[in-house]
Amino acid sequence: MSRFKRFIAPALCAAMLAGTAHADEPKTLRVYNWFDYITPQTLENFKKDTKIPLIYDIFDTNEALEAKLLTGNSGYDVVVPSNVFLAKQIEAGVFQPLDKSRLSHYSHLDPKLMKLLEANDPGNKYAVPYMYGTILIGFNPDKVKAVLGDNAPVDSWDLIFKQENISKLKQCGVTLLDSPSEILPLALQHLGLDPNSKNPKDYDKAEALLMKIRPYITYFHSSKYMADIANGDICVAVGYSGSFSQAANRAREANNGVVDMRLPKEGAPIWFDMLAIPKGARDVEDAHTFINYLLQPEVIAPISDFVGYPNPNKDATDKVDPAIRHNPNLYPTEEAMKTLYTLTPLPRDAERARTRVWTKIKSGT
């Protein structure tokens, strides 16, 4: 799921991280990851330690990655789909199995999380988790208080889905993820329906709910919202947990006030971003080297500090900044974990219904 960590201009990031790689070098490793989901220093260290030329490109939605993967020739050696998309892509034959004999640091992964991920990748055959997180509400406390008062339900999806709340928040700006696979489950949940409903008619009900609040949504976003909430241009956003951690840092550094976040009490999706190797990868050996490099506790912990997300490495947790690992909105408590749910792929008729509904919601007609 897209993840906002630092605000690096994409062109500058790509140029900086490409290093000495050239398009005509047959052994250049090509990585395709979420748009600012790693520290530049990690990539520089990887190139220095392994002597492997690297081109690192970025995307901002699962849908964008999937469109490239389903062409059958993505042009990349390592990609980072979210777990639900991974499950569909495995079924479509997009990936090749990992050679775990090349992953000497595999034992650092938390076996409980690996067991959970078998629902999407039976036997953990095709991918390893990179980061995980939740979808939650980020907000500017002062701006929300000015509109809704001291008792604003910032810890509830009522803040978004109840017309009496969002209609007032319109004046300071509200944005939602541009992702039907993540927003429509929240609408279904709010209606008391299965977030993973396979009934196409349920998506009509979700559409009705979202169309009621559509006039009050400033825009649907993939990357713009984090800069906007940090700058005070919007007051509420539905986005990814670690994104708001970094937006809060940026707002503080710029003296733009406070950005806060809440994991709603009703629950939310929990997602995992996975490292996988496409079937058409040209540099499989170095792809394994890259994945194995990220499985080291001393490598992955600083990335969690930078991006604001927990990682699945059981031996890295105590190396993560306490401000992150002790924040219940970033590292959910055991009690909160009971309210979280994973998303699952939909059958074709439900997927078509969801796509149709989302097109209508975004257009507002």
Image (cartoon, rainbow, N blue to C red):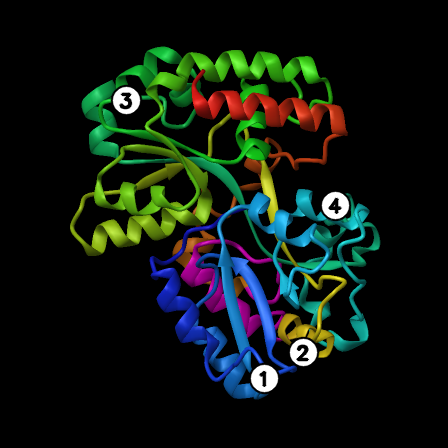
Give the residue drawn at x 69%, y 17%: 200
Identify the residue position indicated by label 4 in the image: 87
Identify the amino acid type marked 1: Ile
Nearest to N terminus: mark 1 or mark 2: 1
Nearest to N terminus: mark 1 or mark 3: 1
Of 202 and 353, which appears nearest the observer?
A: 353
Nearest to N terminus: mark 3 or mark 4: 4
Q: Could you tell me residue 306's position as x and y percent?
A: 41, 62
Give the residue drawn at x 34%, y 61%: 9
Identify the residue position indicated by label 2 in the image: 286
Q: Quadrant of residue 50?
A: bottom right
Residues at circles 1 and 2 in contact by the CB criterion of under 8 Å: yes
For this orientation, the residue located farthest to the left is: 255
Identify the residue position indicated by label 1 in the image: 52
Tag 1 secondary structure: loop
Between the C-alphas of marks 3 and 4, the distance is: 37 Å
Nearest to N terminus: mark 4 or mark 2: 4
Between the C-alphas of marks 2 and 3, the distance is: 49 Å
